[in-house]
Image (cartoon, rainbow, N blue to C red):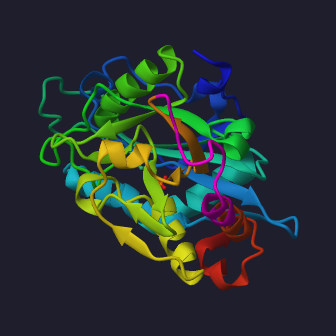
């Protein structure tokens, strides 16, 4: 696997169950329920250094809302109010003196009962932060990455609850991602159980053809917060956006294909399954949306300041 596919992380403090603890003390019992069965939920959030030198978290409220929705879908009651989690995220960034980076809130079930019914085991919350550069590489952001349609299908909507970020569901993403990397690609694109394009291992997908942006509709995919932002930014530029099914061969004949996600931001795809996409480099619409996105997250787009929580 390539270096960019792994991230070693280290910081000062981690917020656990209501207080900041030293990084190395943020440990759990081996019978932690989530560790065995995967019933836990998480978020991925980014904080950016603004053009004016301050730090801002991108769409904090929406991410925390989705964290609580993920917990609700899974019948988990988070023992804190959303406002407390938002404040804890800010505290954790400050405690680690992290001006720019990635934020990982995790809600998990602690130890006590074993077996599939977690019973009264405590629901626990951890928040870690760490520096994280371009998830799919600096080069990938400029030149585009190479993707492969996975042999693994995205779970059916009634198997994997698509509106939740549930820990165990990510085994499906990991299988697809590792297969893609081992086969020499950068990322995996998963089809749904009907054979239509769903999303990448941890990103939503867009195509551009004849100037029209297309992305698979929400029922089968995670409601990506970056996806939502990119749709708004595109419409604002007068680009038509349709949420409609995409077939595998429509990827091959698209003018542009790109991915959106908190980690991947807006990443162009230059090749799918050894077919060159468009001119084989980052396309003009992808480039325009990428730069609009970075204007937003760095506070240059005044119209979208409502999406930023300054530290
Ligand atoms: N799909 C999946 C499966 C993901 O894990 C993610 C990352 N959270 C996304 C899409 C993109 O969502 P967002 O833009 O909210 O990060």
Is residue 285 in the magenta section? yes
- From the viewer's side, name the closer residue of 221 and 103: 221
Q: Is residue 194 visible?
A: yes
Residue 54, by quadrant, is bottom right
| Of residues 182 and 61, the one drawn nearer to the viewer in this rendering | 182
- Which image quadrant: the C terminus? bottom right
Label total for image: 0
In the figure, residue 10 lies in which quadrant?
Answer: top right
- Residue occupying image coordinates x 33% and y 37%: 190
277 sits left or right of 53 in the view: left
Compared across the picture, whether 231 is left or right of 119 comes to right
Looking at the image, residue 1 lies above or below residue 101: above
The vertical placement of 267 against 223, above or below, is above
Q: Quadrant of the N terminus?
A: top right
Q: Does residue 110 show up?
A: no
Span colored in magenta: 274-289
Instruction: Provide residue 205's location: percent of width, then percent of height.
Output: 44, 51
Name the spot of residue 241 as percent of width and height, x first: 43, 72
Q: Nearer the viewer, residue 289 or 43?
A: 289
Give the residue displayed 43% in from the left and 48% down from the top.
253
Indicate the quadrant where residue 107 lies.
top left
Residue 264 colored in magenta in the image: no
Q: Is residue 4 left or right of residue 200?
A: right
Name the one closer to the observer, 156 or 163. Answer: 156
208 w.r.t. 2: above or below: below
Task: Find residue 53 and report its horizontal and vertical position in percent.
Answer: 87, 64
Q: Residue at x 56, y 53 (%)?
A: 45
Q: Residue furthest right?
A: 53
In-image side of 75 versus 97 (left or right): left
């Amino acid at each position: 696997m390539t270096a960019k596919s792994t991230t070693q992380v280290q910081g000062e403090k981690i917020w656990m169950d209501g207080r900041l603890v030293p990084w190395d003390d943020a440990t759990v019992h081996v019978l932690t329920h989530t560790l065995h069965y995967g019933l836990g939920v998480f978020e991925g959030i980014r904080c950016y250094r603004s053009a004016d030198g301050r730090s801002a978290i991108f769409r904090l409220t929406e991410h925390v809302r989705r964290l609580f929705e993920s917990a609700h879908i899974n019948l988990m009651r988070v023992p804190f109010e959303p406002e407390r989690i938002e404040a804890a995220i800010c505290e954790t960034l400050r405690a680690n003196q992290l001006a720019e980076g990635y934020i990982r809130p995790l809600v998990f079930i602690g130890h006590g009962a074993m077996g599939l019914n977690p019973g009264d085991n405590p629901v626990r919350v951890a928040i870690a932060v760490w520096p994280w550069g371009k998830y799919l590489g600096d080069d990938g952001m400029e030149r585009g990455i190479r993707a492969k349609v996975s042999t693994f299908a995205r779970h059916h909507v009634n198997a994997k609850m698509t509106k939740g970020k549930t820990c165990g569901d990510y085994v499906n993403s990991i299988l697809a991602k590792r297969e893609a990397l081992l086969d020499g690609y950068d990322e995996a694109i998963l089809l749904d159980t009907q054979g239509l394009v769903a999303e990448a291992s941890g990103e939503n997908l867009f195509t551009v053809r004849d100037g029209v942006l297309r992305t698979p509709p929400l029922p089968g995919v995670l409601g990506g917060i970056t996806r939502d932002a990119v749709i708004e930014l595109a419409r604002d530029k007068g680009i038509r956006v349709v949420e409609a099914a995409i077939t595998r061969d429509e990827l091959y004949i698209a003018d542009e294909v790109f991915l959106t996600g908190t980690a991947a931001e807006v990443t162009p795809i230059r090749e799918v399954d050894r077919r060159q996409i468009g001119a084989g480099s980052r396309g003009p619409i992808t480039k325009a949306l990428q730069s609009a996105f970075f204007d937003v997250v760095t506070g240059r787009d005044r119209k979208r300041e409502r999406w930023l929580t300054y530290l």
